[in-house]
Amino acid sequence: MDVGELLSYQPNRGTKRPRDDEEEELKTRRKQAGPRERGRYREEELTVVEEADDDKKRLLQIIDRDGEDEEEEEEPLDESSVKKMILTFEKRSYKNQELRIKFPDNPEKFMESELDLNDIIQEMHVVATMPDLYHLLVELNAVQSLLGLLGHDNTDVSIAVVDLLQELTDIDTLHESEEGAEVLIDALVDGQVVALLVQNLERLDESVREEADGVHNTLAIVENMAEFRPEMCTEAAQQGLLQWLLKRLKAKMPFDANKLYCSEVLAILLQDNDENRELLGELDGIDVLLQQLSVFKRHNPSTAEEQEMMENLFDSLCSCLMLSSNRERFLKGEGLQLMNLMLREKKISRSSALKVLDHAMIGPEGTDNCHKFVDILGLRTIFPLFMKSPRKIKKVGTTEKEHEEHICSILASLLRNLRGQQRTRLLNKFTENDSEKVDRLMELHFKYLGAMQVADKKIEGEKHDMVRRGEIIDNDMDDEFYLRRLDAGLFVLQHICYIMAEICNANVPQIRQRGPQHPSRCTGAQLSTCTCSRGHTCYHGCCVCPACPPRPCPQLRRLRVSPHSSVCWPAGQVGGTGEQPPTPHRQGRRINTPAPGPSAGKMEECSALSPSSAQRGVGLSCTCLQC
């Protein structure tokens, strides 16, 4: 379009619009004028209107003509045009490199070539609209040339390349052509794109807006590639990205979008990746995460974006704690003390701190953390949360069910891992205030048992409909139904039942006598459904409530007794860990376990339990006191 012609064009404005007083005077003159003068006035008005119409037509003709010229100049994007574009890019890149080498101290000599190079990089953005042609970028070596420009002395050029790569790797674009995307990602990975991007990040100044945008687009490239090919996360972390992310997070800079993005990418790298978790621990990443989270100990995030960053850091910490070596680092870094303080301060971070404690204590690897938690008076903090869920829990995006799930999981881990004096202190908590915590435990039991019964009824109805339609219920459908049961409350119910079994077998009279006094006194019929069919502790046809009549459990065939408690487990599982314990001894007597066979469901007297329990017919066939 000829912009100069448009700008220089001046329409014929004609006579100025008269003011109101002038209009009145003009009307008076028309009335006083004769017929010939009135005709002259009308001719002048028609002339002005015709001139205005001519101006509009002329302007439209200019626009139409320039639009046709643009259409003639634009070429359809095909293989030939992309090849021509790549060839032009290679020529300009080589020319700029040659001039920079020839005149290193005279920028005026190579500045024009640098502008031309930047222009062709901008033109190459059009290739992102045709992912089917990505193979040309690889075949003509354009990808390697672009990666080479990431280290260009002029950061404007490197940022332009980052922008282009970000658009080429957009996840929506990649999914449009899987074949073209695979070729491009393979070329980028082979060229160690992450290492080059990290080197470029080190020299960018985020106080400059354009360079800050370059950092953001760099992180977007990593996120896109990780989403399309998750297995490249390990290689990306080892090429310096993980170290740069930790450095950026602990930098003393105001909160901005880039810090939020760093927390997101960090959480992505640590998800289901033990190698990256171990690497983060070796880089003192646990301390970095704890330092960043300590800000929210007494202060709530000021914005929704800052709260999102906080949640990303908590998720990263939970992911790291899946590795046993990081739990030791968490313990040495006083992570338990920080989480305990967060629970007491009642800020938004409390719900996430509860989740971190759950991850830190679960399993045999959490034994040291469990003992330390009791030593720092953590029981005083956790039990008030067990007795009553916080009212403002919905404001932080955590449901009441999630809160109770983490609390029950923590208590189950404490009962499983604590020994000696710490275990006694925990059990004594259940006897305080007329055993109110036992009442709360039974209240939660019936709450989630009811939810499970509703879910099971719905699932059974769906199974019946599927059978009636002739559909086959395969293993995948069984897994889906099982996940739905877990989501409905089975997971929480399993923890609750384990807690009840542990405390009832602890020989604490106040707890054992509390069952018959509870207003919601249960019967064995209320627990007629097996709460677990996947190898956890079974409560089919029996109840841990001391008020229930003794009945055998038909689900468990071969059992062993946990060496640390009188709770009976299926063979090959102690506390759900899958560990085969040796046959335990207690008071010098060996505990005999029934062998698999027709008599597996019969009751056997358990000599490991207290005499009062043995007299009541406690058997090895179930964890309850009545089997």
Image (cartoon, helix red, strand yellow):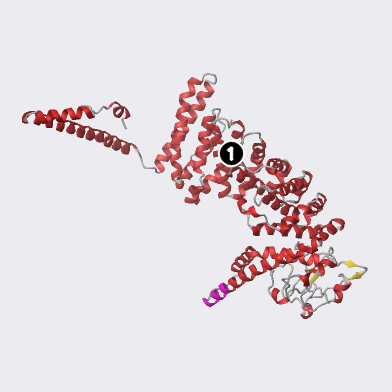
Q: Is residue 7 above or below residue 417?
A: above
Instruction: Report the residue at 84% width, 58% height from top.
Output: 423
- Quadrant in the picture for residue 517: bottom right
Image x and y of residue 99, in percent: 50, 23
**Where in the figure is residue 158, as x and y percent of width and height?**
53, 33
Q: Nearer the viewer, residue 189 or 285?
A: 285
According to the image, label 1 marks what residue?
258
Q: Is residue 192 left or right of residue 174?
A: right
Residue bounds of the magenta highlight = 461-469
Q: Nearer the viewer, residue 246 or 500?
A: 500
Q: Is residue 321 left or right of residue 589?
A: left
Based on the displayed image, in which of its 4 quarters is residue 582 positioned?
A: bottom right
Q: Magenta span has 463?
A: yes
Residue lying farthest to the right in this orientation: 588
Quadrant of image for the N terminus: top left
Q: Residue furthest top?
A: 106
* Residue 519 picture location, percent across and down: 73, 71
